[in-house]
Amino acid sequence: MYNFRTDMADERNEFYKASNDLDKDISGIKTSQFIENKHIRRNTIDVLNKNAEKAIGKPIGKYVTFDLEDLRYADEDEIEESASIIAKELKKIVDEKMPESDGEVLVVGLGNQYVTPDSLGPKVISEIEITRHLKKYAPKYVVDGAKSVSAIAPGVLGTTGIETFEIVKGIVENIRPKLIIAIDSLASKSIKRISSTVQIGNTGIVPGGGVDNKRMELSEKTLGVPVVAIGVPMVVDLATITDECLNVLIGKLQDEAKSNEYLNHIKNQSNYDEIRNALVPDDFNMIVTPKEIDDLIENMKNIVSKSINYAL
């Protein structure tokens, strides 16, 4: 297994293939692509066995990724269209994990609301349509077919002193939901995917996994309840940016020089490990996010929250 600095299943798959000079999917990985519209492309990665799980470091299950091209600053119509498309796929996964129509869903917004790149989860929670109390005390105000929904933003260990898992576990034991939907900010190895991609997985989530700050995982194995994870890349690390920028520079030089054996050799391999090893000893390997992250978070908060509301 490789030391990936990304939470994205499709990136891990592509990186593994490139590192092993494979021109087709590895055994146990099934991929598919679909163009939803001129702005949205859907990629699906099915991890089918332990061989694939070990290779890319993602549990057996389904990972659906939506690339929202040119929608980092979407208008209202684009937000509605994007949310509707994502909601259809999310509803399929929810229905698979929770066939009963009257089951209760707990939505968990992971992250630190005081750290902007990590605040997506708590911000989404503020927009979720809560129905659990209405179904009990004022059912006439609940739309027919709507599921019973409750929500929590548990904060992070550094501000609460309590592991997120411990908080969620306590809630699960008390209200006994049939399904959990967890929202979190992710790490990507591509700059262009910051606030431009949504990943839905049916295997749960390990908070902080992409930035070397792993907490206890939230999954059916640990909580006894199926966990669907929704994540949006909001950060990349400095070594990843340097590697990507180096490839961009080499591509530019190749376009001008047309041929250069040494540059071809550098561009055709990943330089991440070498760059990271050079940065880490001096504590120079930072986690980086765009300067306009506040606006990007607001934009993606609207898309993700509407997707969840429509699906439920």
Image (cartoon, helix red, strand yellow):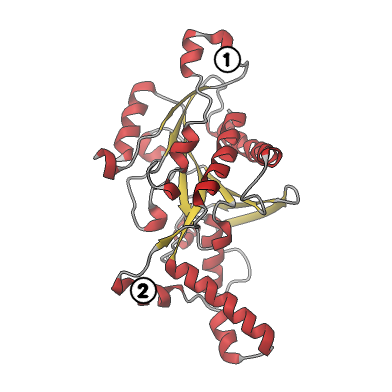
- Ranked by sequence position, the earlier of labels 1 and 2 is 1
Left or right of 215: which side holds 9?
right
Give x and y (percent) for residue 274: 41, 78
Q: CA distance from mark 1 to mark 2?
A: 54 Å
Give x and y (percent) for residue 289: 47, 57
Extreme right residue here? 38
Visible residue check, residue 5: yes
Q: Residue at x 57, y 57 (%)?
A: 193
Mark number displayed over residue 142: 1
Can you identify the residue that label 2 sits on? Answer: 279
Q: Residue at x 51, y 8 (%)?
A: 138
Q: Residue at x 38, y 64 (%)?
A: 286
Give x and y (percent) for residue 301: 54, 40
Q: Nearer the viewer, residue 82 or 65?
A: 82
Tell me whether the residue at label 1 lies in contact with that at label 2, contact meaning CB atoms closer than 8 angstroms. no
Q: How many marks?
A: 2
Mark number displayed over residue 25: none
Visible residue check, residue 162: no
Give x and y (percent) for residue 99: 56, 27
Q: Is residue 79 above or below residue 236?
A: above
Q: Is residue 188 above or below residue 136?
A: below
Q: Residue at x 62, y 84 (%)?
A: 253
Q: Nearer the viewer, residue 58 or 111?
A: 111
Residue 92, by quadrant, is top right
**Type of residue at label 1?**
Val
Secondary element under disc 1, as helix, strand or loop, is: loop
Point out the frontmost of discs 1 and 2.
2
How dense is the environment of label 2, judged by Cα within 10 Å: few (below 14), some, or many (20 and up)? some
